[in-house]
Image (spheres, rainbow, N blue to C red):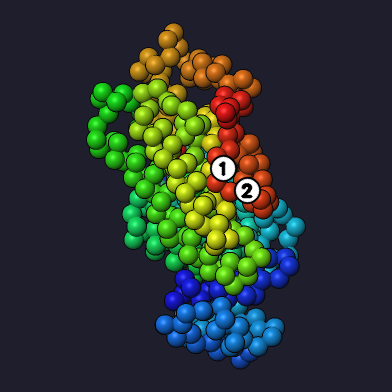
Amino acid sequence: MLTKILPALRGILATDDGLPRLVKMETATADAVKIAVPDDCGDIPAELRRQLPEGAQRFDIAGVGCYQAVYADGSGRVSGKVAVVTGAAQGFGLQIATDLARQGAWVALADINVAGVEAAAATLNQEFGPGTAFGVAVNVADADSVQAAVKAVVAEFGGIDIFVSNAGVVRSGSVKTLSVKDLDFVTNVNYKGYFLVVQAAAPILAMQHSACPDRWFDIIQINSKSGLVGSNRNGAYAGSKFGGIGLTQSFALELVADGIKVNSICPGNFYDGPLWSDPVKGLFRQYLESGKVPGAKTFEDVKKFYESKVPMHRGCTTPDVMKAIYYLVEQVYETGQAIPVTGGQVMLS
Ligand SMILES: NC(=O)c1ccc[n+]([C@@H]2O[C@H](COP(=O)([O-])OP(=O)(O)OC[C@H]3O[C@@H](n4cnc5c(N)ncnc54)[C@H](O)[C@@H]3O)[C@@H](O)[C@H]2O)c1
């Protein structure tokens, strides 16, 4: 019931400035309103409206716990929104989560690298204030793990406004030789993982919308330029990303009725992130050692080779991606799109 009642409560407490965060209290205060919602309740928002007196801010909810509504007072671009970012221990995910926190969001950093997201959340709390962020364990390829992570986010913040499905992996290789194990690994994280996180998060966003029908919520998938054009000797990855756009378009058609926009962002290569730059296992080292770039003798040679394919002659950065994220959140009249952020390397037809 927690994952139904708290999002519904957030929704009916919405003001012109947005939905509050619901903060767990250890014990009920004297002014806490007692709420009890039967398990078979067919319309939770209506039932909550019936039970709540005007202006109530603290709640003692049977079977759920005691919560207090807290409204944001900042002026950031996503001030007071609850955001979840998967794959947030490093790379794009960490930088996206950091920028959302900088712009006023409460952020759940979800990753299979639990120590990584806990450390990252502690850093964000130091920088942007206690309670801004928390780290949550998730394996996006595992349905139970995803459900548990979404429940943990709702228990912490009360609901979700922006879900960024960012976790992704690469195993490049020829179709003639790539192992089925590597194919399954990539497909399970990039394609099935995206399906599973939307399956778990969509009911939360839909419940908020049913409680405040004039509000829209966002699911944003970090896809890739390889979701728009084929990628030589990288079919498993490109296929998983093409499939992700099929999911985005299909989810967008279905979830529009629930007040949820679903879009993908398709970045070009992010050379500054660890996927490319890690000195031990990054792609610069892998491509240099495998001779994939003819004549290359240094990481810089490999980088120049790939940059020369980009009309704007540089890789993609997180600020480039953030502009697309804020566009999607602020644009109330768009869904089902796949937005390239590639410096002109991939153009839509
Ligand atoms: N790096 C690029 O050049 C590039 C370009 C375009 C798109 N992308 C996409 O951006 C996203 C992030 O890429 P990145 O370069 O930051 O990658 P990265 O490898 O630096 O980080 C990926 C994060 O995802 C986490 N992760 C992996 N499997 C997981 C799972 N099963 N469950 C939960 N978390 C998991 C990892 O622990 C890691 O923290 C991916 O979807 C990727 O396809 C990357």
Q: Residue at x 73, y 60 (%)?
A: 74
Residue type at mark 2: give it. Glu
Residue drawn at x 57%, y 24% is 345
Compared to 252, does 173 lie above or below?
above
Residue 119, can we see it?
no
In the image, is 166 to the left or to the right of 214? left
Estimate how packed mark 1 is, as few (under 14), some (14 to 19) or many (20 or more) residues with alpha carbons within 10 Å.
some
Tell whether circle 1 marks a residue whose Cβ is less than 8 angstroms from ligand 1.
Answer: no
Q: Is residue 272 left or right of residue 112?
A: right
Screen quadrant of the N terminus: bottom left
Query: Answer yes or no: do the residues labelled 2 and 1 have beta carbons within 8 Å?
Result: yes
> Which quadrant does the C terminus fall into?
top right
What residue sits right under mark 2 in the picture?
A: 334
Total marks in image: 2
| Amino acid type assigned to the residue bearing label 1 in the image | Gln
User: Where 138 sits versus 60, above or below?
Assistant: above
Horizontal side, residue 57 vs residue 337: left or right: right
Q: Is residue 49 visible?
A: yes
Image quarter where ligand 1 lies? top left
Mark linked to residue 118: none
Instruction: Give the image quarter of residue 327.
Output: top right
- Per the rendering, the mark at residue 337 is 1
In the image, residue 108 lies at what x, y percent? 52, 58
Question: What element does badge 1 sit on?
Answer: loop
Instruction: Please determine whether, in this image, residue 214 is positioned above or below residue 90.
Output: below
x and y percent of residue 44 in the render?
52, 79
Residue 324 lies in quadrant: top right
